[in-house]
Amino acid sequence: MQPLLENESSVFLFTLSGLNETMENRYVFFSLTALFYPLMVLCNLIVIFTIISQNTLHEPMYIFICNLCVNTLYGTAGFYPKFMYDLLAEDHVISYVGCMIQIFVIYSSVLCDLSTLTVMAYDRYVAICRPLEYHSIMTNQRVLEWILFCWLTPFFCMSVLIVLTARLTLCGSTVEKLYCEIWAVAKLSCFSTTVNNVFGYIVIIGYFGHAVLIYCSYIQLIRMCIKSIEVRHKFMQTCVPHLLSLFIVAIALLFDVLYSRYGSKNVPQGVRNFMALEFLLITPILNPLIYGLNLSTVRQRMHHLNCI
């Protein structure tokens, strides 16, 4: 048998160092978060309840919007309760198992967001470019298959990444973020993380393929807009909110991935924290506002419910 390596260690707790430089303002941040998180949950629940309770909204586009809001509640639940606890605690630690669960929840939620937005782009393409075939293509079974795809694919990708990370022997326990992030944990490994990197890039390339599908869908949609004023109106009403939501998610995730892998430690902690929080801060509150207030059908139904 080979002797155990001297630098090999078992990590049971991680220290989250992202709050270290902002603790003097922790009560301010806690107060803002305590206002923001319930508001965000309420906005998403209102959209979900409106869509579920109104039979006229049981259409593919609105079901996908509902899925987007459910996913928002799932993803933010993996961050905000722990973040609020850390703001009041002296030591910002998380167990190894808790760290893996947080990684799984947050990043499977982000990938589910991208998958849902991709499916929504396809739905808009069929609705606008092939309206006569819409109901034969977007059947209830097809919608269910797309919803399962949006959830199961991220779950599979993140499960593999978690297994690959769990096999690593770690030589450190400090994660330089506000929450557990898979690359930040992998960098603590005593040995090579080539397998993790390869699979990580496969996932990134796979979801870049989602972006290609969205791009192709919108090229066709824009061509149709040029030909028809009616199509242009429909595009502005239903597709522009989708594009805005997609842009925010994509930019936030791109910043997070690039900074995690290639970012400089010379960047101020506050800037790093904001970049890390973009897709947990902006998207969760904007999605229900964009789709709940901008889409006239949802807005009218919400008003109708309030009047009952």
Image (cartoon, helix red, strand yellow):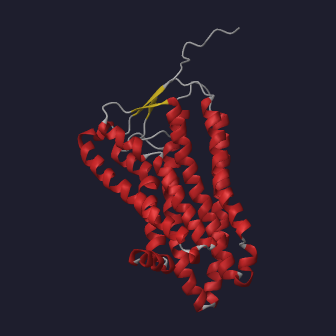
Q: Position of residue 232 (x, y in %)?
A: 57, 86
Residue at the location (29% across, 46% down)? 30
The answer to whether one can see residue 187 in this image is no
Mark yes or no: residue 121 visible: yes
Tag count = 0
Residue 82 left/right relative to 56? left
Using the rendered view, name the quadrant where residue 58 is placed: bottom right
Give the vertical position of 157 relative to 136 (above or below).
Answer: above
Quadrant in which the C terminus appears:
bottom left
Q: Is residue 144 left or right of residue 305?
A: right
Does residue 156 lie above or below 291 as drawn?
above
* Position of residue 273 measured from the top left corner of the image (x, y, whole percent): 38, 46
Q: Which residue is rendered at x = 45% and y = 77% of the image?
A: 299
Q: Image point 67% across, 42% down: which residue? A: 199
Q: Quadrant of the N terminus?
A: top right
Q: Whole-percent x and y of residue 216?
A: 67, 71
The structure residue drawn at horizontal position 65% and vertical position 65%, both measured from the top left corner, is 119
Nearest to the observer: residue 275 or residue 99: 99
Taking the image as shown, residue 16 lies to the left or right of residue 195, namely left
Q: Quadrant of residue 191?
A: top right
Q: Is residue 107 above or below residue 17?
A: below
* Location of residue 285 in the rendering, given as x and y in whole percent from the top left corner: 42, 61
